[in-house]
C-alpha cells in the first residue's frame, strides 16, 4: 500500500510539472503574432485576426498605450490587411496589443 501512495504522488508531481511547462501564456508575457485582419470593431477597439499558417483566430484589444506603425488607428484597418506585432494577456484573459504594424 505504501508503494502505491509513492507512485501516485510521483505521477501527480509529473503531471503537474507537464501542465506547468505547457501553459500557453501567463498574464503579462509578451506574445508575438501575425496574420490577416478578419474584422475590425472600432467602437470596442478590437481587431479579429487569423493566422494563415496555423488557422488560429484570435481577437486583440488596441488601447492608448498600443504602439501602431503604418496606421493612425484601428479604423484604418480593413478586412484582409496583414498585421504583425505583440500583445500581452491580462489577468482577465484579454489580448492587449503593445505594438502592431500593418505590413
Image (spheres, rainbow, N blue to C red):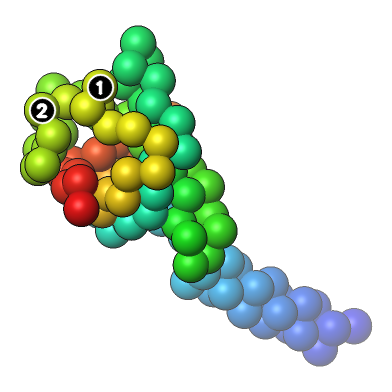
Residue 83's spot in the image, x, y percent? 28, 49
Residue 73 picture quarter = top left
Name the one closer to the observer, 20 or 56. 56
Q: Nearer the viewer, residue 24 or 11?
A: 24
Q: Is residue 39 visible?
A: yes
Q: Quadrant of residue 16?
A: bottom right
- Picture residue at 40% right of the left edge, 43% below the top: 80
Give the image location of residue 2, x and y in percent: 82, 84
- Residue 82 vertical position relative to residue 54 in the rendered view, above or below: above
* Circle 1 SS class: helix
Residue drawn at 20 percent across, 46 percent down: 102
Q: Is residue 9 left or right of residue 19?
A: right
Q: Is residue 97 left or right of residue 13?
A: left
The residue wearing badge 1 is: 75
Checking the image for residue 72, the label placed there is 2
* Above or below, comparing residue 45 to residue 21 in the picture: above
Quick check: 72 left or right of 11? left
Question: Residue 35 location, x and y as percent?
Answer: 38, 54
Q: Residues within 10 Å of mark 2 (few under 14, many from 20)?
A: few
Please identify the quadrant where the N terminus is shown: bottom right
Residue at the far bottom in the pictured view: 3
Determine whether the residue tagged by mark 2 lies in a helix, strand or loop.
Answer: loop
Q: Are marks 2 and 1 in contact (CB under 8 Å)?
A: yes
Pick whichever, 17 or 91, lies toward us.
91
* Alpha carbon separation for disc pair 2 and 1: 8 Å
Considering only vertical position in the picture, is 22 above or below 29?
Answer: below
Amino acid at each position: 500500500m505504501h508503494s502505491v501512495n509513492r507512485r501516485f504522488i510521483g505521477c501527480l508531481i509529473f503531471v503537474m510539472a507537464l501542465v506547468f511547462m505547457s501553459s500557453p501564456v501567463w498574464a503579462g508575457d509578451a506574445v508575438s503574432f501575425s496574420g490577416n485582419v478578419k474584422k475590425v470593431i472600432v467602437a470596442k477597439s478590437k481587431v479579429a485576426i487569423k493566422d494563415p499558417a496555423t488557422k488560429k483566430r484570435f481577437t486583440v484589444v488596441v488601447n492608448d498605450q498600443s504602439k501602431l506603425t503604418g496606421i493612425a488607428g484601428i479604423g484604418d484597418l480593413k478586412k484582409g490587411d496583414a498585421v504583425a506585432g505583440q500583445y500581452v494577456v491580462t489577468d482577465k484573459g484579454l489580448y492587449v496589443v503593445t505594438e502592431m504594424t500593418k505590413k
